[in-house]
Every structure is written in C-alpha cells, then in structure tokens.
Image (tube, rainbow, N blue to C red):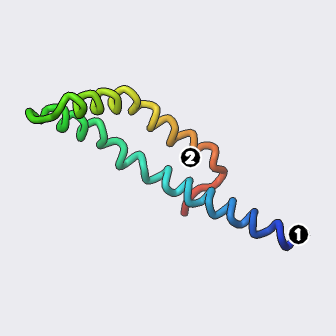
C-alpha cells in the first residue's frame, strides 16, 4: 500500500515546489502589468472593447498580487 501512495505524494510535492517557484518569480513580472496597461490604454486606436478590457484588468490587478502572496505563504515549500 505504501508504494502506491508514494507516487501521489511525490507528485504533490513536485507540484507544490513548481507552484511555489512560479509564485516567487511571478510578482516581478506582474509588477510591470499596470505600466503596460496604462501604455495600452493611451493608444489612440484602441477600440472600446480594448478600453473596457484595460479597465477590467486594472480593477482586478490588486487581487493578482495578493493571490500570489497567498500561494507563496501556503505552499509549505520554498524554492531553492
């Protein structure tokens, strides 16, 4: 029984490590997102759909950073 349960545990640990590692690197990329959205919103030929998308993304951006921090805090794994 232990032999069959270990691969599942190994998968969980590897997934946790990958998730933690990704969550650690993502804020660096995510921190530039508001700047990119502001640049896009200033394009003179941006359609109304594009403007609406920028507004929606700007409105939900704060949740991205806090969600990433929750993943980091709750992963139980720290990348090396």
Q: Which mark is residue 36?
A: none
Residue 58 as seen in the image, left or right of residue 20? left
Q: Position of residue 47 (x, y in %)?
A: 17, 32
Local crowd at mark 1 within 10 Å, few (<14), some, or many (≥20)? few
Q: Position of residue 8 (x, y in %)?
A: 75, 64
Q: Is residue 38 above or below residue 14?
A: above
Q: Which mark is residue 2?
A: 1
Query: Which quadrant: the N terminus?
Result: bottom right
Whether label 1 touches label 2, CB < 8 Å: no
Residue 77 as seen in the image, left or right of residue 42? right
In this view, the residue in front, 5 or 72, is 5
Res 39 quadrant in image: top left
At horizontal 48% and vertical 51% (from top left) the residue drawn is 24
Q: CA distance from mark 1 to mark 2?
A: 29 Å
Res 59 quadrant in image: top left
Local crowd at mark 2 within 10 Å, few (<14), some, or many (≥20)? many
At horizontal 29% and vertical 36% (from top left) the residue drawn is 34
Query: Which quadrant: the C terminus?
Result: bottom right
Q: Secondary structure at mark 1?
A: helix
The residue identified by callout 2 is 72
Q: Is residue 25 above or below residue 67?
A: below
């Amino acid at each position: 029984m232990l032999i069959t349960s270990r691969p599942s545990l190994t998968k969980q640990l590897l997934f946790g490590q990958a998730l933690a590692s990704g969550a650690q690197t993502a804020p660096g990329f995510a921190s530039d997102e508001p700047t990119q959205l502001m640049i896009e919103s200033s394009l003179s030929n941006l359609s109304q759909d594009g403007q609406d998308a920028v507004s929606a993304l700007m409105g939900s951006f704060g949740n991205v950073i806090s969600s990433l921090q929750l993943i980091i805090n709750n992963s139980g794994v720290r990348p090396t």
